[in-house]
Amino acid sequence: MPQTPRAPHAYQSGTLARIVDGLRYGGGIGQWSWLAHRLSGLGILFFLIVHITDTFFVVFAPDWYDHTVAIYGGVWFDGHYYWPLRWAFRVAELGLIASVVFHAINGVGVILYDLWPKGSLYRKPILWTVQVAFWGIMLVTTPIVLYPLRKAPDQPAASRPAPPPAGVASVVPGR
Amino acid sequence: MTARSTGRRIRPSGGYELFMWYFMRLSGLALVFLAVGHLFIMHILNNVETINYAFVASRWTAPRTGWIWRLWDASLISLAVIHGFNGLRQVLYEYLSAGGRIVAGTVTWALTAVFIGAGGYSILMFQPDEGFIKEHPLKIERTTEISSASAPPASQPISVAR
Amino acid sequence: MAALESSRRVGTAVVSKLYPTRSHTGAAQGGIAAALANLEDDSWENHAYDTIKGGDFLVDQTAAEVLCREAVECIYDLEHMGLPFDRTADGRISQRRFGGHTKPNPIYDKNAAPGTEAAKPRIPVMRACHAADRTGHMILQTLYQQCIKQGVTFFDEFHMLDLIMVDGEARGIVAIEIATGQFHTFHAKSILLATGGFGRMFKVSSNAYALTGDGPAIAYRHGLPLEDLEFYQFHPTGIYRLGILLSEACRGDGGVMFNGKGERFMEKYAPNLKDLASRDVCSRSIYQEVRAGNGIGGKDYVYLDIRAETINKYKTSPTGETVDSAWVEKRLPDIIEFARTYLGVDPIREPMPIQPTAHYGMGGIPTDIHGRVIRDSHDTPVPGLYSAGESACVSVHGANRLGTNSLVDLVVFGRRSGRAMAEYAAGRKFEPLPPHPETPAKTMIDGLLSRSRTEPWVRIRDEMQTSMMDDCGVYRTEETLTRARDVLIKLKDRYRNLGVQDKGTVYNTGLLEVIELGCLLDIAQATVASALARQESRGGHSREDFPDRDDRQFFKHSLVYRDGENGTRMDYKDVDIITVEKDGRVTTKYPLEVRKY
Amino acid sequence: MLSQAELIDPQARTLTVRIKRYNPEVDEKPHWEEYKVEADGHDRVLDVIQKVKWEQDDTLSLRRSCAHGVCGSDAMRINGSNGLACKILVKNLRSDTLTLEPILGLPVLKDLIVDMKPFFDHYKSVMPFLVNDEQPPTAERLQSPAERARFDESTKCILCACCTTACPPFWGDRKYVGPAAIVNAHRFIFDSRDRGAAERLEILNDAEGVWRCRTVFNCTSACPRDIKVTQTISEVKRLLMTGNIDLDTAPSVVIGN
């Protein structure tokens, strides 16, 4: 169908500009939930890739595996314990938990909108329930996850091991 | 009134996007239990700092419950990888043109296959290295020894789910 | 409608200064009348009688009969195109009552005591087919959808500037593409002007900004007459101050108007139909009340009350039964939303402040029943030129249009003219265009662009609107009309020196508004001239100095021609009357009577 | 009985109007301009813009026609979110700054005017017309009130583009047909008189069709006609899954909005 020819100098913002502009859009809690869902999903996927890779070590290199997961406790490959590393990983861990919890709860909301015939009509209640449930869970979870940070790992701070010989480093503290 | 007043039936169209959309919702529901459960066990009941090779081995090779954990982890990995990469694909589709989409679709599916393969291989092909476990035992403090856990006392915290 | 009908036979293009779905048909609310008799007995003859009486007998009767007879067929046509009418319980098109739509009272008794049911010769009838209170919206959408299906070509946002007339024959139009500022010449075998009304010449108006009478003004400038312009309808129930329409369906469904004393004042003015009297009667009644100091709080408005308890108290619901708020909400969803948005009033709980608002021009480009534009009092058609809708005057509305008849008019005569113009075009070759047909339009635009801005053009518009509202509104006198005439001449002189501030070519909407103002000024002038010449009161034209209808002198259509830059020339045309033979005597089918409701 | 309308200017105020201007004949890209306008509480945002245009800067361009929310011309971004300028009153503005931008995701032609062609192309792509080749009866086709109510929601659409240009997936992917097109497909799919549902569903069952919807609900909030847009899209999705056009799936109450 022939259509109206248009002015040649129309201003077209690029995809990125549209997205940035979109962030200023007053979509409210619905739009923020969508964004959080998307970002948490991407974050979880990133972690999943890392996690599958490190778990892959269990099959053929147990020591690699132990070294890798020891990082979560703040022990670097050189066998040293660094508290900022441990703190950073704890916070990241909390972020992961938050992502999964939010993605899960909000995902249930999305499923309700899509599969329950009346779901879309309960948008606001669902969105607020998601918020309440998420923050409720995080309120309980956060102290539990951060609790171990109150003290150094289960090793006397004084008897921190000397740098181990290169290669195999035993960082397993005495039981 | 007309006979059609109770509704019409139209053959569902099927199709790739419909299937993936449906899959996302169903796998999402399953993942709520699998992933949240996994996180709960690993991060709340346990402490990630205590996880090591011995822990994994004790879980996957437990005499009666090992297969459950392997099944759990295997389904978690497969569903999560498909769910995740399909999500990534859909996000990418939103911002890519036709050519880019073909690339994105192919790459995400290839990565899906790679990671399910890797994950599945680790879980299903796992054989514990007893020597290594002896050298690097479980880091978890327990009220009773693992070896005597054939009938764990009721007071034992479920610190290692087996 | 015309485009759709015409596209079934010949290549058709629609040139519109808006996107087609923005047309003001979409604002029509209450319904479209057709004697389908889905809910009660009715016939198209009743409809024709109401139309002729409603138009204060200044209606061409053959046209009115065509209108009412074909309305039925057209409604079914629209339904088949997918228009989502509301339905009755048995699945047929739902109908509601509307002002001025009546049928003979089956229990009428000449000797019955006044005030009783039997004493009313005619009673309201449910004739207006409706889709909630968005009937116009549905018609517009449905027709646009069908045009898409049919592959009609649309030139959206092309502003018509001029008509190309050669040897008294229409051969094309000149339009400016708003998006680029380019001139386009459209060469056509037949052209239909469906440019809508010109209500923007009044201050308080229910009309869209776009309704500036471009079509009639351009025809007028080409020496064609405009018919019956003095009859301009003021809708009684416009939102106070804004003029946004609150449909007559409010009253059709039982709404009642009250003055500041809390009286149902329509009982005084139309004892039979009360609030369902025709629009001109209601508007005048409101003015009378306001003048008598009976406005709300002594101000210039009254209340329209559609609360369920009021409807129940006065037993005004269509079927007479008790209704509740939910029913009102379902019947009038958009109206209720308008009131909530623009008045801050919840009509479910409070009455709405209303005042008459300029609504519809009964007059326009004179056409015959095939939509052909006619050039003189002898019905000589202009070859290739057609008109339909509010811009045309067939005339089926006479001195006052009945509610819902505008939609009937545009559908019935749109369809007829579409057919006629396709028929005409199919049998002809393209006639050559004159060299550079766009020159006059271009000169006008170049003038506006080259002159510097002497004064804001809105000042001229505001003065015109105020003058028209005050001096050529619901009530007129020799004195006010003369004043308006002089004001308009001065405004036109000022207009000729106008320049615009925006000199750009892309979406120069300021420039277009000035052009539209030019059209309005021409039509305002023609309106005042027609009103000044008609020394009687009839329908929408109320001369306080001549309060009675004068059938001896003025039972005729007025035609106004342009005469020089600022002048006008009047001519008259007979009203088309159907005669019947009864008992060997020839009488008129619709005898003149005093119009009372 | 004192109604609000009697108070002439309940909250007359001076507004700072920020408008994103773009003149293709001069500018490389849009820029902001500021105006001060005295506004009455009952003024519409449209009136405020017209005051700027008529009294201060005639070069400002916008579309408008009916000025009471039934034609859909003046869709724009008002203080961040989409809406019709003629349906928002000054007294309902929360701050004294009024920010106006063209709707997002369509090419800007000038100031507040965007190119609607892509939008209408999407609309046309879903066959927005009744398809029924059966010989119609001489009178109307019958349709029960319940069948009529089934698609009432989607008949209200005025094609103003508020929903489509509020949709984050549409900002990313402009080939997505968008909420408005789906609403208009819904209007016919659920019309008991229509026979083209299967074909329309085929069109919408695509990466650029309903599956692009991420239930963000920006469309539902933006709709000036209060159409439950996301709900209509979900109904189409479920229909694609189940193939069952069930009259009972037309709920009408919105909870908690």
Image: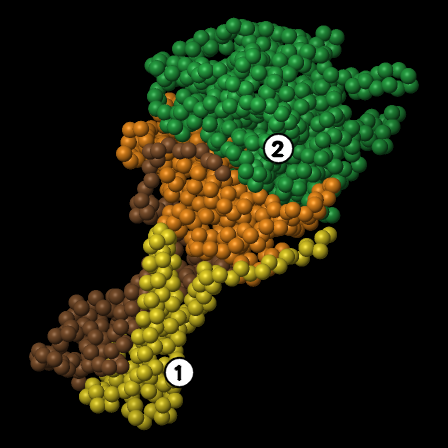
Q: Position of residue A50 (x, y in %)?
A: 27, 69
Which residue, given by chain and number where applicable, does mark 1 sit on?
A: B68
In this image, C88 relative to A46: left or right?
A: right
Say above or below: C35 vs A78.
above
The hue used for chain C is green
Say above or below: C291 vs D208.
above
**Tag of residue A51:** none
In which quarter of the view is residue A78 placed? Answer: bottom left
In which quarter of the view is residue C304 placed? Answer: top right
Q: Residue furthest right?
A: C583
The hue used for chain A is brown
In which quarter of the view is residue A88 placed? Answer: bottom left
**Residue at horizontal 32%, vertical 83%?**
B125
The chain identifier of the residue carrying mark 1 reads B
| Chain letter, orange in picture | D
Which residue, given by chain and number where applicable, does mark 2 sit on?
A: C9
Q: Looking at numbered disc 2 in the image, what kind of residue is underneath it?
A: Arg
The hue used for chain B is yellow
In this image, C470 relative to A146: left or right?
A: right
User: What element does badge 2 sit on?
Assistant: loop
Q: Position of residue A62 (x, y in %)?
A: 22, 82
The chain identifier of the residue carrying mark 2 reads C
Pointer 2: residues within 10 angstroms few (<14), some, or many (20+)?
Answer: some
**Residue at horizontal 43%, vertical 49%?**
D176
**Residue at horizontal 38%, vertical 47%?**
D171
Pointer 1: residues within 10 angstroms few (<14), some, or many (20+)?
Answer: some
Separation of residues labelled 2 and 1 (CA atoms):
74 Å
- Asked whether residue C61 is in view, the answer is yes
Q: Position of residue C112 (x, y in %)?
A: 87, 27
Q: How is the image coloured?
A: by chain
Q: Looking at numbered disc 1 in the image, what kind of residue is underneath it?
A: Ile
